[in-house]
Image: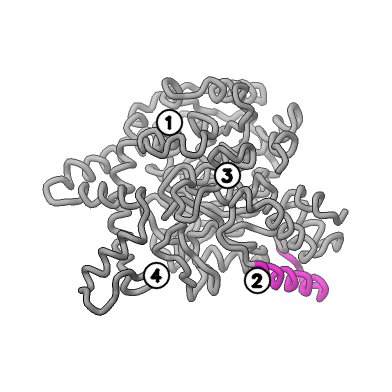
């Protein structure tokens, strides 16, 4: 089986197995995905940069290793789409912003190094909301990405390029980052799988910072097992990252291969439903809870009152940290420089550069954060938000004394139309209502498909939340739910996604 259509429909695990067995070459697989990108990405706009020559060189190296009889890793030769927030030596990294347009990093992020060391083939860099600030990938300086289910809809954000690349079969694997839901929310609205590992489980060295206490890189895929295989490649302690956890990587692949919920206690939080939730989303979620019970789980109702405050706390903490992190983009050291005609001061050049280089959403968050950190307001805003963060963490701790995992809808609605919420920031922010508490507490979470909403036939995501450093529980539950769904209704993406 070597034709391009069949190759791009393989899972990452199947692709790696066929390469290792000599049934396919890494070059064949890479060329099939590059052809797919060429055929459809003009419509989808998942990629900001396609590294054709670099990808083929990596693929040839994998084939050479196999020809020499060297043992290949579990993802050797499998193509991947990398969110354009991780530095890649010799390849542009823009973070979706004009202020870094054309910047070529002189080094690889730790995550990038680990992908290369595992012989994963990096196809290119994917589109994203500028500096990962957004829930729709409409805030990219290079234009929006379309949702392959309906190109007039958003693919989620901030990592919409990565999720769209998966859903349009341009790559079997992708990398995203999750600050308030930017892996899980795109996964939900595109019918794919996205995982936010425990905070500190995946190195942030070389990942351009938005909000340092919240940002977390993680795996994106079309199946739970594929996500687990990628998780194992990118996770692990990194001495270059001061927030990296020095602990063993949980047995995520083993959990994904042996999915079961029998005897597990699964929590349902009453705060994760109500006004603003689409009827079809709640319907599919309730069906998922019934399925979990049928598979042998005990369902436990939970009350976590502080979760109602999570959105407000997040939109003080994240902008405050962004205000600090983005201060380095001054036009003097790297990136775009505007107005340097020899007559202006450094301060004027910095001001003009930021005016031209940052988009509206980034400016909005910088101003919010600077105000929240200003003298006289720090305790009232940022300090209070951190106290709420502590309350949310305590609510999770109490919940996990009663249950093994928590489930919820990933997003309150299915994908909305491009432009629909562009002039209403609050409506946009509400897209991350269910995902934000996990970032504030640092727990692990996953989104996986749980069917299509009957009113619009668009994907709905089921969110699974586990305690910190118990990431394997996500894969154990996720694999069991996925297997049950596929057995009964087929995989929603592979079976029903409209063709491009």
Q: Earlier in the sequence, mark 4 or mark 1?
A: 4
Q: Nearer the viewer, mark 4 or mark 2?
A: 4
Q: Whole-percent x and y of residue 279?
A: 53, 20
53 lies left or right of 437: right
| Secondary element at image label 1 | helix
Which type of secondary structure does the marked residue at label 2 adopt? helix
Residue 100 in percent (x, y) is at 42, 65
Q: Give the class, few, some or many, for how many residues have Cα within 10 Å of label 3's Cα (few <14, many ≥20).
A: many
Which circle's residue, 1 or 2, is located before the other in the chain? Answer: 2
Q: Residues in magenta?
A: 52-74
Q: Which residue is mark 2?
A: 54
The earlier-in-sequence mark between 3 and 4 is 3
Mark 4 lies on residue: 335
Circle 4: is it few (<14), some (14-19), or many (20+) Cα within 10 Å?
some
Q: Is residue 362 found left or right of 476 in the rendered image? A: left
Occupied quadrant, residue 207 = bottom left
Q: Is residue 484 left or right of residue 188?
A: right
Mark 4 and mark 2: span between their CA atoms? 23 Å
| Disc with the residue nearer the chain's start (3 vs 2) | 2
Tell me the tag on residue 399: 1
């Amino acid at each position: 089986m070597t034709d391009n259509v069949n190759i791009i429909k393989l899972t990452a695990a199947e692709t790696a197995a066929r390469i290792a067995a000599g049934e396919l070459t890494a070059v064949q697989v890479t060329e099939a995905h590059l052809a797919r990108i060429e055929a459809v990405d003009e419509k989808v706009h998942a990629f900001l940069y396609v590294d054709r020559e670099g990808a083929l060189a990596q693929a040839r190296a994998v084939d050479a290793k196999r020809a020499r009889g060297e043992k290949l890793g579990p993802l050797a030769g499998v193509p991947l789409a990398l969110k354009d927030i991780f530095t890649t030596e010799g390849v542009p990294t823009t973070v979706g912003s004009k202020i870094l347009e054309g910047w070529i990093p002189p080094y690889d992020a730790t995550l990038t190094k680990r992908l290369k060391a595992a012989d994963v083939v990096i196809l290119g860099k994917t589109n994203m909301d500028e500096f990962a600030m957004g829930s729709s990938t409409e805030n990219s300086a290079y234009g929006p990405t379309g949702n392959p289910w309906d190109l007039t809809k958003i693919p989620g954000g901030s990592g919409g390029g990565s999720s769209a690349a998966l859903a349009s079969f341009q790559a079997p694997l992708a990398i995203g980052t999750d600050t308030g839901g930017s892996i899980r929310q795109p996964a939900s609205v595109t019918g794919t799988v996205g995982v936010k590992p425990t905070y500190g489980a995946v190195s942030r060295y070389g990942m351009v910072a938005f909000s340092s206490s919240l940002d977390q890189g993680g795996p994106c895929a079309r199946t739970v097992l594929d996500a687990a295989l990628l998780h194992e490649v990118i996770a692990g302690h990194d001495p270059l990252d001061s927030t990296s956890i020095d602990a063993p990587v949980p047995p995520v692949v083993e959990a994904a291969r042996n999915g079961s919920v029998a005897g597990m206690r699964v929590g349902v939080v009453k705060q994760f439903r109500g006004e603003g939730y689409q009827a079809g989303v709640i319907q599919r979620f309730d069906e998922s809870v019934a399925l979990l019970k049928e598979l042998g789980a005990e369902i436990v109702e939970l009350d976590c009152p502080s979760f109602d405050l999570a959105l407000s706390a997040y939109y003080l903490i994240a902008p405050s940290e962004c205000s600090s992190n983005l201060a380095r983009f001054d036009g003097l050291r790297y990136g775009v420089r505007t107005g340097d005609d020899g007559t202006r001061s450094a301060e004027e050049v910095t001001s003009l550069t930021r005016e031209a280089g940052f988009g509206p959403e980034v400016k909005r968050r910088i101003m919010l954060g600077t105000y929240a950190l200003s003298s006289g307001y720090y305790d009232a805003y940022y300090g209070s938000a951190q106290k709420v963060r502590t309350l949310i963490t305590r609510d999770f701790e109490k919940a996990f004394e009663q249950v093994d995992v928590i489930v919820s809808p990933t997003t309150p609605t299915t994908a909305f139309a491009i432009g629909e919420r562009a002039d209403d920031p609050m409506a946009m922010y509400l897209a991350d209502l269910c995902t934000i508490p996990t970032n504030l507490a640092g727990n692990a979470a996953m989104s996986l498909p749980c069917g299509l909403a009957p009113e619009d036939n668009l994907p709905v995501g089921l969110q699974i939340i586990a305690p910190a450093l118990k990431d394997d529980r996500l894969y154990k539950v996720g694999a069991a739910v996925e297997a049950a769904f596929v057995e009964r209704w087929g995989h929603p993406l592979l079976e029903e996604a409209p063709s491009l």
